[in-house]
Image (cartoon, helix red, strand yellow):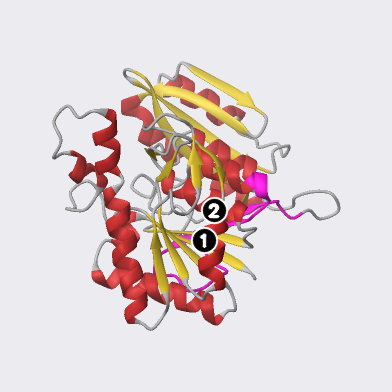
Amino acid sequence: MTVQILKFGGTSLLDHQRRISAVSQVKKSLRAGFTPVVVVSAIGRRENPYSTDQLLSLLKNPSARNYTLLATCGEIISATLFSNMLEREQIDSICLTGGEAGIFTTRSVVNSSVLYVDSTETQQHIQNGYVPVIAGFQGRNVLGDITTLSRGGSDTTAAAIGLSLHADEIVLFTDVPGILTADPHIVREAKVVPRLSYEAARLLASKGAGVLHEESISWAFKAGIPMRITRFDCFDSSLGTWIGETVQQNGKDPFFRFSVTSQEYEEGYARITIVFEPRNRPVDMEELLKEILCRHRGISCTHYDGYVEIIVPTLQCDGVIFLLHNKLTVWQQAH
């Protein structure tokens, strides 16, 4: 059994046409000889009627238990709908809550963490010829309470399920083509980063890259399962961003890669992080960094192993990212 975990984010299931594309991804997996296991997020984003945020807006000062029960509904609706779409395409499918899929978490009912996964029931359904569709972002604790994970929890669900089933690959479908070299709203010429190590991906996630979730990468790393991030309508397996152990040639990683991200630092300031690989490859940016600190009123610049952090006024942030991206792109092309 060669298991492939297919995780569909909320924007990948936003409308009927996107859900048809998602069903086609399952068909592609089956044709390729994989055993697909699907994990879904709630449909859409904040303004959409079945999104988690929209459902939670119905509550007023809820208890933790009531909050949690409603918070899980978006993913259950999504999983039920998607499983039904597979059935209509003559693909035997079964919808499972996180608890039914054997996801056990810490005791807290909100912002819980996955402890382990007992995949016995999921494996039984697979052996009976069903494609499991698992509601992400949720599990149960040792007391039997329904629990919810932190934001991005559906990615963590996918990775933890992948570990328990010894999956060959975890594919995360979203509305962007992969991890980009910068925010495309700031740098229109931003490109997809074709591959990253687990360590670099985890670092980017911790520094504000919204398409990644740190806990999910940790689970994939623990299992040694590669992850791929790609668009919901991309059917070319060579595209997107591949995350795993990087390829070495003569003991060295020959391909220079980078990504620039940012997050709020403190009031009025932003922290820009440049993550690059190979980690030990020197990048000649000293003069540019000095210029940024001077011209853009930056307050600090710190070099670490594999990344650089710059603190600048929030109003200067986009311009600094644009400058850094251009410099790194030129350096990349020259090397």
Q: Relative to 21, does residue 71 appear above or below in the rendering?
A: above
Q: Residue at x 49, y 46 (%)?
A: 103
> Which element carries disc 1, helix, strand or loop?
helix
First reached walking from the N terminus: tag 2 or tag 1? 1
Query: Mark 1 and mark 2 in contact (Cβ < 8 Å)?
Result: yes
The residue at the far right in this view is 250
Say left or right for 88 vs 224.
Answer: left
Q: Of the residues shown, which amino acid type is indicated by label 1?
A: Thr
Q: Which residue is mark 1?
A: 122
Badge number at residue 161: 2
Out of 265 and 224, give the one closest to the viewer. 224
Out of 51 and 279, give the one closest to the viewer. 51
Q: Quarter of the image holding residue 277?
A: top right
Out of 85 and 93, give the one closest to the viewer. 93
Could you classify mark 1 by the number of other residues whose Cα lies within 10 Å: few (under 14), some (14-19), or many (20 or more)?
Answer: many
Q: Quarter of the image holding residue 274?
A: top right
Say left or right for 221 vs 316.
Answer: right
Question: In the rendering, at what x and y percent does residue 46 appear?
Answer: 22, 46
Whether residue 251 appears in this view of the structure is yes
Which residues are the magenta region?
Answer: 221-247
Out of 227 and 289, give the one closest to the viewer. 227
Badge number at residue 205: none
Which quadrant of the rendered structure holds the N terminus? bottom right
Question: In the rendering, at what x and y percent does residue 284 appear?
Answer: 65, 35
Question: In the rendering, at what x and y percent does residue 272 appear?
Answer: 46, 30
Q: Residue at x 31, y 68 (%)?
A: 18
Q: Residue at x 57, y 39 (%)?
A: 202
Q: Of the residues shown, which amino acid type is indicated by label 2?
A: Ile
Q: Based on the picture, tell me whether residue 237 belongs to the magenta stretch.
A: yes
What is the count of numbered marks? 2
Distance, label 2 to label 1, CA atoms, is 9 Å
